[in-house]
Image (cartoon, rainbow, N blue to C red):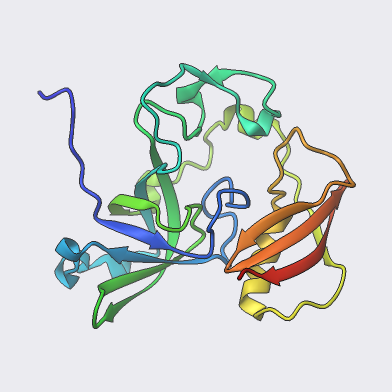
Amino acid sequence: MADDLSIKKIAEIKNGFSDKFGIPRQSGLCDKVISKIVFEEKYRTAEALRGLEDFSHIWLIWQFSESVREDWSPTVRPPRLGGNKRLGVFATRSPFRPNPLGLSCVKLEGIEIDKKLGPVITVSGADLLDGTPIYDIKPYIPYADAKPDAASGFVGANERIKLTVYFEKEQNIDNNIKEALIQILSEDPRPAYQNDPDRIYKLDFEGCTVAFKVKETELTVIDVKEKK
């Protein structure tokens, strides 16, 4: 058995996340976020997707393309714990791994045939950066994949608090983008160790730069500007 396995990029994801800051920390948290899966030319065949339309959700196996490095550490500092505690890398979903692979469950919204791109899959709830390489797609099977009684370790021990999002002034942005943006911001994209109510944060999404502040459980959008 070979020690090293060469895997092929079959597709990449296209969405409004041009920067890592603001991407949902887990898949499925922001179902208003829509992404497209565009296949590499070699794999642009509808036959490879025959039957996939009968599933409501799919698994994506992908690469942490912005976190590839030669070395690795057996322990990491999960942001959810404020970056103050180290845990074993295999007890976390940190991108800094021996093999920088990610696994995401997303909702299958549809499959269309594009004249130039072949079959294109539309999904919602992805937690991937625009352009992320995808190595495999598998159907989500509820009776095997869903484990309602599963323990969630340090993740379950920390209460997930959603922020209430306000806009300081009316913004002229598409309503679908606004709904997705509210979901993203309500999940609190800040690092867990940052809690300065006067600090202005900036997030890039769908060609716009969003400036916001957070005080306790309220997030206020100060401005939304189109990137030039």
The N terminus: image quadrant: top left
Q: Is residue 193 above or below residue 179?
A: above
Horizontal arrangement in the rendering, residue 129 relative to residue 183 (left or right) = left
Pick out the residue farthest to the front. 228
Q: Nearer the viewer, residue 4 or 48?
A: 4
Residue 167 vertical placement versus 62 (above, below): below
| Quadrant housing residue 160 | top right
Foreground: 156 or 193?
Answer: 193
Quadrant assignment, res 69: top left
Residue 201: percent from left, percent from top = 76, 51
**Foreground pick, 142 / 179:** 179
Count the labels in the image: 0
Q: Residue at x 46, y 18 (%)?
A: 73
The correct choice, above or below, for 99 with respect to 189 in the image is above
Q: Is residue 54 left or right of residue 223?
A: left
Image quarter hosting the C terminus: bottom right
Quick check: 16 left or right of 38?
A: right
Name the residue: 47% across, 52% down: 128
**Residue in front for this viewpoint, 156 or 15:** 15
Give me the residue at 62% from left, 73% from top: 177
Q: Position of residue 88 (x, y in %)?
A: 51, 19
> Would you identify the image quadrant in which residue 131 lies?
bottom left
Residue at point 56% right, 49% down?
A: 20
| 77 shown above or below 50 | above
Residue at the outermost left position: 1
- Measuring from the top left, give residue 87's x and y in whole percent: 56, 19
